[in-house]
């Protein structure tokens, strides 16, 4: 198992040395201490090589955390912050900085060493995994259609000879299964808890298979799950397991930002923010983009905006959206409310109903822009909605 390179940084020489001494006997890490001084606030200032883990302790003010939050996500290591438990501003800044954990002072030797053990194990697994792409769908404003698009894009990719797992991260309602007329027998939380022993066979056992070959990973709504019950690093480890044997992992992410969703967004290869043509949608999408770009430090190249239910006759034009959001290359999914509503009610992806509607062609262009053109067997005929409702 490779050793974890740990940098302990802080303004108190005593606290830094205490943490270094705690880790000195851990054979899984190499540890170095660094006292922040000489007017610097960046714990990583002047480093030619980043550590695997930054332990930031004894923070004084918000300068160190702000500096890390301003650093792009791909230019900072894993971060764990030790700080006061009664300072919401510090906790919020730690989240912005991408911290995987925020622990209260004083330092606890068991907590610190358990972190090292966990990161060493994750590092070993990541070294041997070939990762498929992690693509996240999230609404810019509630009800914009992210779940519908995530489902149909995942189905389109699976129907075109790609191996795809679709993940519903709505822990309370888990409604995505109804878009595919599936009833999950296993629970997403079970998969997260089993991640340390998980391989491809056991991982697939937690999913429900659709006729297209698409696999769904979802919660059991008979139980109440709260985001606080789930450790972000465990969720990310689980997603990485599914990436290791899939071409694509498509995540339907609820529209709120907390440590859990921030971790998913920061690890995504691509994020699609779904909106519609209205001023409220424009306002909320702009706010979400600001959070992603400026608060979470997500690179613009990983973000794209999808205009769902697009109409050329809308008062809000595409150029208005591009100018307001400072984006280009918008994805357009044409409006066909009746057809999409009937498809959702029947629990059948649109391409299994018709291939001629403009909305289906828009979806096809979208998923081919993600996975390329890799047409599978298209000999089967679409089913009529009338026959679907008679099942």
Image (tube, grey):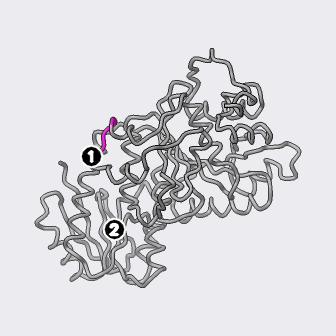
Frontmost residue, 145 versus 107: 145
Relative to 98, 301 lies left or right: right
| Residue 306 screen position, x and y as percent | 68, 46
* Residue 371, label in figure: none
Relative height, residue 112 to residue 73 (above, below): below
| Residue 119 screen position, x and y as percent | 27, 56
Residue 10 location, quadrant: bottom left
Q: Residue furthest front?
A: 390
The magenta region covers 197-201
For mark 2, what is the residue? 80
- Indicate whether residue 119 is drawn in magenta: no
Magenta span: helix, strand or loop, mainly? Answer: helix
| Residue 211 screen position, x and y as percent | 54, 28
Question: How many C-alpha atoms fall within 10 Å of the one at disc 1: few (<14), some, or many (≥20)?
Answer: few
Cβ–Cβ under 8 Å for marks 1 and 2: no
Would residue 302 be visible to someone looking at this image? Answer: no
Frontmost residue, 289 versus 248: 248
Residue 43 location, quadrant: bottom left
* Residue 197, label in figure: 1
Kindly identify the residue that appears in the image at 71 percent across and 31 percent down: 390
Kindly identify the residue that appears in the image at 60 percent across and 31 percent down: 156
- The tag earlier along the polypeptide, 1 or 2, is 2
Q: CA distance from mark 1 to mark 2?
A: 25 Å
Frontmost residue, 337 versus 61: 337
Kindly identify the residue that appears in the image at 48 percent across and 73 percent down: 92
- Quarter of the C terminus within the rendering: top right
Which label sits in the foreground, 1 or 2? Answer: 1
Question: How many C-alpha atoms fall within 10 Å of the one at disc 2: few (<14), some, or many (≥20)?
Answer: many
Frontmost residue, 208 versus 311: 208
Kindly identify the residue that appears in the image at 66 percent across and 27 percent down: 352
Relative to 187, 304 lies left or right: right
Relative height, residue 44 to residue 163 (above, below): below
């Amino acid at each position: 198992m490779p050793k974890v390179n740990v940098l302990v940084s802080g303004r108190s020489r005593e606290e830094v040395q205490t943490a270094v001494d705690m880790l000195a006997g851990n054979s899984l890490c190499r540890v170095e201490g660094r006292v922040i001084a000489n007017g610097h606030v960046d714990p990583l200032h002047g480093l030619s090589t980043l550590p695997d883990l930054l332990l930031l302790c004894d923070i004084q003010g918000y300068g160190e955390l702000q500096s890390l939050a301003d650093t792009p996500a791909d230019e900072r290591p894993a971060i764990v912050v030790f700080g006061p438990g009664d300072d919401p501003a510090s906790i919020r800044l730690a989240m912005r900085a991408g911290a995987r954990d925020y622990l209260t002072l004083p330092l606890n030797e068991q907590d610190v060493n358990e972190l090292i053990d966990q990161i060493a194990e994750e590092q070993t697994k990541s070294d041997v995994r070939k990762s498929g792409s992690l693509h996240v769908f999230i609404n810019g404003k509630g009800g914009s259609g992210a779940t519908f698009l995530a489902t149909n894009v995942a189905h389109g990719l699976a129907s075109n000879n790609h191996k795809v797992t679709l993940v519903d991260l709505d822990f309370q309602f888990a409604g995505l299964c109804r878009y595919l007329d599936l009833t999950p027998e296993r629970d997403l939380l079970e998969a997260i808890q089993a991640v340390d022993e998980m391989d491809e066979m056991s991982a697939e056992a937690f999913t429900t298979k659709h006729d297209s070959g698409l696999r769904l990973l979802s919660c059991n709504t008979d139980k109440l799950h709260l985001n606080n019950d789930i450790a972000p690093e465990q969720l990310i480890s689980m997603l990485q397991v599914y990436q290791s044997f899939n071409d694509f992992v498509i995540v339907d992410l609820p529209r709120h930002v907390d440590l859990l969703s921030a971790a998913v967004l920061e690890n995504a290869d691509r994020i699609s923010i779904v909106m519609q043509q209205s001023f409220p949608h424009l306002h909320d999408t702009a706010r979400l983009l600001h959070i992603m770009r400026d608060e979470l430090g997500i690179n613009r190249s990983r973000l794209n905006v999808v205009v769902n239910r697009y109409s050329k006759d809308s008062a809000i034009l595409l150029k208005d959206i591009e100018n307001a959001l400072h984006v280009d290359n918008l994805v357009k999914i044409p409006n066909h409310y009746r057809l999409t509503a009937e498809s959702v009610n029947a629990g059948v992806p649109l391409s299994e109903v018709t291939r001629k509607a403009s909305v289906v062609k828009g979806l096809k262009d979208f998923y081919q822009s993600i996975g390329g053109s890799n047409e599978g067997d298209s000999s089967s005929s679409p089913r009529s909605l009338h026959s679907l409702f008679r099942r």
